[in-house]
Image (cartoon, helix red, strand yellow):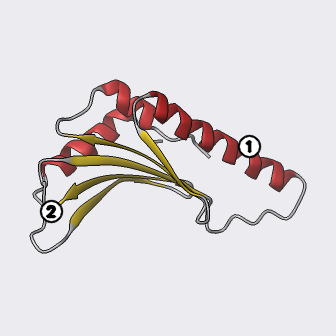
Amino acid sequence: MLTYSELKSRCQKAMATPPIDDMEESVSVLCQNDWVRILVVRDKDIPERLRIEVEVSLPSHSDPESGEGVKVFVKNLIEHLEYILRLDEKGLTLEAMFRDGLWTAYMDIDTLPDDQLFKSLIPPSV
């Protein structure tokens, strides 16, 4: 299971990585599972500004038949939507692309955030 200190260390490493000259933006993946992807995004035009971005989406292989499988899926969905709402409480900005079933939370940073933010970024375990 991912710890907040591992997540913080990965973010610190991404922040220290210089941007690639010929790309619009560079993206470092801090964490990824079936439901959540946590990224650090660096814009080519303003390389000192970084964005922590959390994406929550339905798993690509999510097609429970009925009964218990549907219950587990719904519980996981609720848990991940509550997770994205908790990120809003921590100051991240929420966006949703309803057609794609994608919810995002992001925050622009110029220095390494405190431990409390990294603790909040830890996704629910599925």
Q: Secondary structure at mark 2?
A: loop
Q: Is residue 119 left or right of residue 63?
A: left
- Asked where in the image residue 58 lies, by quadrant, the reply is bottom right
Closer-to-camera residue (93/82):
93
Crowd band around label 1 with a 10 angstrom C-alpha radius: few (<14), some (14–19), many (20+): few
- Could one spot residue 102 in this view of the protein? yes
Q: How many marks?
A: 2
**Front label number (1 vs 2):** 2
Residue 2 pos. (x, y %): 43, 41
Q: Is residue 121 left or right of residue 29?
A: right
Closer-to-camera residue (14/82):
82
Write the residue at 60% across / 43% down. 80
For badge 1, the amino acid type reads Lys
Residue 113 pos. (x, y %): 26, 32
Q: Secondary structure at mark 1?
A: helix
Per the image, the residue denoted by label 1 is: 75
Q: Earlier in the sequence, mark 1 or mark 2?
A: 2
Contact, mark 1 vs mark 2 (Cβ under 8 Å) = no
Height in image: 23 above or below 104? Answer: below
For badge 2, the amino acid type reads Lys
Residue 90 pos. (x, y %): 42, 28
Cα separation, mark 1 vs mark 2, equals 39 Å
Write the residue at 44% across / 31% down. 120
Write the residue at 47% across / 34% down. 88
Residue 122 pos. (x, y %): 45, 38
Height in image: 102 above or below 11? Answer: below
Q: Is residue 125 left or right of residue 61?
A: left
- Outermost residue on the right side: it is 67
Crowd band around label 2 with a 10 angstrom C-alpha radius: few (<14), some (14–19), many (20+): some
Per the image, the residue denoted by label 2 is: 44
- Asked where in the image residue 110 lies, by quadrant, the reply is top left
Write the residue at 51% across / 56% down. 33
